[in-house]
Amino acid sequence: MNLTGGLHWHWRAWRAQARWAQTRTEIETWLLAQPVQTDHLLLIGASAGWMMSTPWLQRYQSVQTWDIDPMAGPLFRWRHGRALKARGVRLACHTGDALSQLPQLLRDQPQLTVFFDNVLGQIRFQNASVEHTQQRLSSIKQTLRGRHWGSLHDRMSGPVAQAWPEHRLPGAGHTAQGASHEAVSTQQWLGLMGAQSPWLDHLTDSIFPEGTHLTNLAWPMQPAYWHWLQAGWVSP
Ligand SMILES: C[S@@+](CC[C@H](N)C(=O)[O-])C[C@H]1O[C@@H](n2cnc3c(N)ncnc32)[C@H](O)[C@@H]1O
């Protein structure tokens, strides 16, 4: 069973477009601010690209999407295919477990830039224990050594004091990898979102190498249950 994608996700995403619009714009601004390092993109956890920026995808010569959800490919083509074709970007949509196949994918295609599109924060729901989740994330990080890669993922999530749209989203914030969730700056960020304890830790705090510049984004996934997304890029 796919706990993080599939029909339920598409239905929720389609209905939530207005609520997610600010987060989507902030993701696009963040993506477009990054220099393109290679011409070929591997997008993992692409789904239909509900939160993905078409102008950013158009910067590549080829885009390869992966998702375990069989509906993801056709829906991604529906949402982004025409605009990519118009710019001559080659699009290939694959159904499968890209995380398990990552070593092979990277061996076969050394020129790829890898982007994990809101998928690494869900690994804790696909594993039996915290320890197993941490091992899996650590192994993915090792596999990526020497590559140009980025990720946008859940850092934490939980209830907020006041629901969207009454409570407006704070704009994007910035931090460096290594800041604890108990640090004053992090607590201030959670405070801006109106976080009400307890919040779920998605166990992604060690994904990026120490010192990586990170962008924090608020995402009203549900009106009164928000996610703290963290995004960063790693160069070889
Ligand atoms: C939160 S959704 C991502 C949303 C997507 N980036 C968007 O903009 O619509 C997480 C996605 O990751 C996919 N996924 C989960 N585990 C995966 C894996 N091992 N390989 C590829 N995709 C995976 C799920 O099927 C789901 O579509």
Image (cartoon, rainbow, N blue to C red):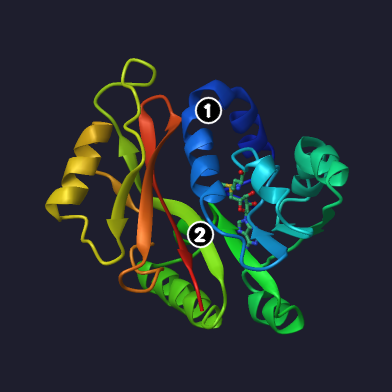
Q: Position of residue 66 (x, y in %)?
A: 72, 59
> What is the C-alpha distance between the residues marked 2 and 1?
19 Å
Q: Amino acid at mark 2?
A: Ser
Q: Secondary structure at mark 2?
A: strand
Q: Is mark 2 within 8 Å of ligand 1?
A: no
Q: Position of residue 3 (x, y in %)?
A: 57, 49
Q: Nearer the viewer, residue 59 or 173?
A: 59
Q: Is mark 1 within 8 Å of ligand 1?
A: no
Q: Is residue 31 visible?
A: yes
Taking 93 as reference, is 28 left or right?
Answer: left
Vertical arrangement, residue 25 with respect to residue 114, above or below: above
Taking 220 as reference, is 40 left or right?
Answer: right
Mark 1, other Cα within 10 Å: few <14 / some 14–19 / many ≥20: some
- Which residue is the site of mark 2? 151
Q: Position of residue 163 (x, y in %)?
A: 34, 21
Vertical arrangement, residue 155 with respect to residue 77, above or below: below
Q: Amino acid at mark 1?
A: Ala
Can you tell which quarter of the image residue 6 is in?
top right
Taking 124 as reference, is 216 left or right?
Answer: left
Q: Is residue 197 visible?
A: no
Disc on res. 21: 1
Vertical arrangement, residue 163 with respect to residue 198, above or below: above
Q: How many marks?
A: 2
At 66% from the left and 51% from the top, the residue drawn is 46
At 50% from the left and 73% from the top, the residue drawn is 235
Q: Position of residue 86 (x, y in %)?
A: 86, 41
Single out the residue that lies furthest toward the top: 166
Q: Nearer the viewer, residue 218 or 90?
A: 90
